[in-house]
Image: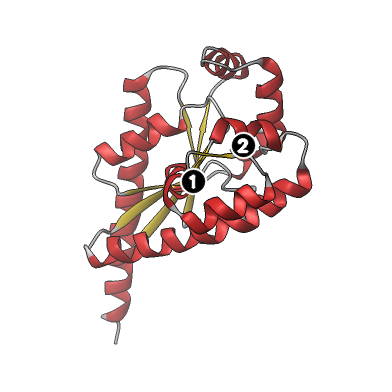
Amino acid sequence: MIILGLTGSIGMGKTTTAGLFAKEGIPVFDADETVHHLYQNNEAIIEAIDTLLPGVKIKGKIDRQKLARLMRGEKEKLFALEKIVHPAVEKARKTWLQKTETAGHKMVLYDIPLLFETGGETRVDKVIVVSAPRETQKQRVLSRAGMTEERLAHILSRQMPDKEKRNRADYIIDTSKGLEDAAQQVQSILQQLADKAQADTGSALKGNNVP
């Protein structure tokens, strides 16, 4: 099985790009959606987070906007939050991967915003970085409800710079030219991976036939 890791800074179009891979039949593990599910449904994690940051639990669930506000500038509490959440996400990922393997899928994709920041690149075969020019990124993010330049700066301070991500990527998808162009880039990457897998299989079979 080929495991792809998809990442990119806020506003780069990562979620949309993950959807393009899904359209091509590639199962996608959405780390952010998994965290959201935990905040809504996992009582142990909800209580642990509310103990760490009292008042962040609203009607039995974690209020993500309030959590984000309380976490600003709180590096120690951020590390503590990650220790609560990351093991549960990892457990969910392993369960999901086992199910996709059992179903016979030959390729899957992990959609992980902080892939490099959490060392997740060591668990994938290829890294795909979604990128766009800085002005495009800023325009997209600031058009979101409730977003400010201050909040954007705080989010970017937690993320590896786009240039460094691009330098460490196996593939880069530029989303600045529209959805159709991005879809073509996705298809091109999948074709390259399929061709390489076929070539590797052919080499292995040829090697086995050598006296």
Categorize mark 1 by other alpha carbons within 10 Å: few (<14), some (14-19), many (20+): many
* Mark number, residue 39: 1
Q: Is residue 118 visible?
A: no
What is the quadrant of residue 84 in the picture? bottom right
Question: Which colour assignment does the render follow?
Answer: secondary structure
Instruction: Name which residue lies at 70% across and 54% down.
Output: 80
Secondary structure at badge 1 equals helix
Instruction: Name which residue lies at 67% across and 30% down.
Output: 69
Q: Give the percent coordinates (x, y) of residue 34.
A: 43, 48
Marked residue nearer the N-terminal end (2 or 1) = 1
Q: Which residue is mark 2?
A: 67
Residue closer to the observer: 118 or 168: 118
Q: Is residue 66 left or right of residue 210?
A: right
Q: Give the percent coordinates (x, y) of residue 66.
A: 61, 32
Residue closer to the observer: 120 or 172: 120
What is the quadrant of residue 15 in the picture? top left
Q: Is residue 198 left or right of residue 173?
A: left
Q: Is residue 83 visible?
A: yes
